[in-house]
């Protein structure tokens, strides 16, 4: 019985480590995209401000690691929509 419990614990820990690594990788992508969106916002002179538009990679990564993946997807989508709106408005 103790060996079975130890094996089960090992499997659970391995699964949690895989999930954490997946989130770490996703948050690195999220932070890279956020900083890229910041550059695009400045290039297009959109004038947005606030933490959403920060150029600080570490802040974006930290935020992402502490929210759900769905929250990170929503935030990414919001930046994309706002950039699209800005570019569309500038073309008029």
Image (cartoon, helix red, strand yellow):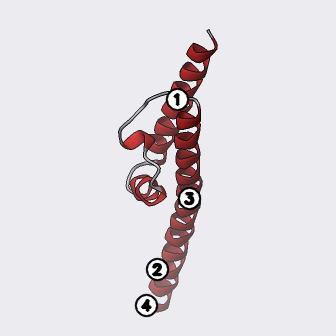
Crowding at mark 4 (Cα within 10 Å: few <14, some 14-19, many 20+) = few
| Quadrant position of the N terminus in the picture | bottom left
Q: Residue at x 47, y 50 (%)?
A: 55
Residue 64 position within the rendered picture, expressed as x and y whole percent measured from the top left: 44, 53
Instruction: Give how far apart the Cα atoms at labels 1 and 2 are.
Output: 53 Å
Q: Nearer the viewer, mark 3 or mark 4?
A: 3
Which residue position is annotated with label 2?
Answer: 9
| Left or right for 29, reference 47 | right
The alpha-carbon separation of the residues under discs 3 and 4 comes to: 39 Å
Task: Give the CA distance from mark 2 to mark 4.
Answer: 10 Å
Label 1 sits on a secondary structure element that is loop
Residue 28's label in the rendered image is 3
SS state under label 3: helix
When the figure is inspected, residue 91 is found, relative to residue 82, above or below; the finding is above
State the residue position of label 4.
Answer: 2
> Label 4 to label 1, Cα distance in Å?
63 Å
Q: Earlier in the sequence, mark 1 or mark 2?
A: 2
């Amino acid at each position: 019985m103790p060996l079975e419990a130890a094996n089960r614990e090992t499997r659970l820990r391995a699964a949690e480590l895989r999930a954490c690594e997946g989130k770490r990788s996703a948050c690195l992508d999220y932070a890279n995209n956020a900083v890229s969106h910041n550059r695009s916002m400045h290039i297009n002179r959109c004038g947005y401000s606030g933490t959403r538009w920060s150029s600080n990679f570490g802040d974006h990564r930290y935020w992402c690691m502490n929210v759900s993946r769905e929250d990170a997807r929503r935030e990414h989508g919001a930046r994309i929509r706002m950039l699209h709106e800005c570019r569309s408005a500038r073309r008029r």
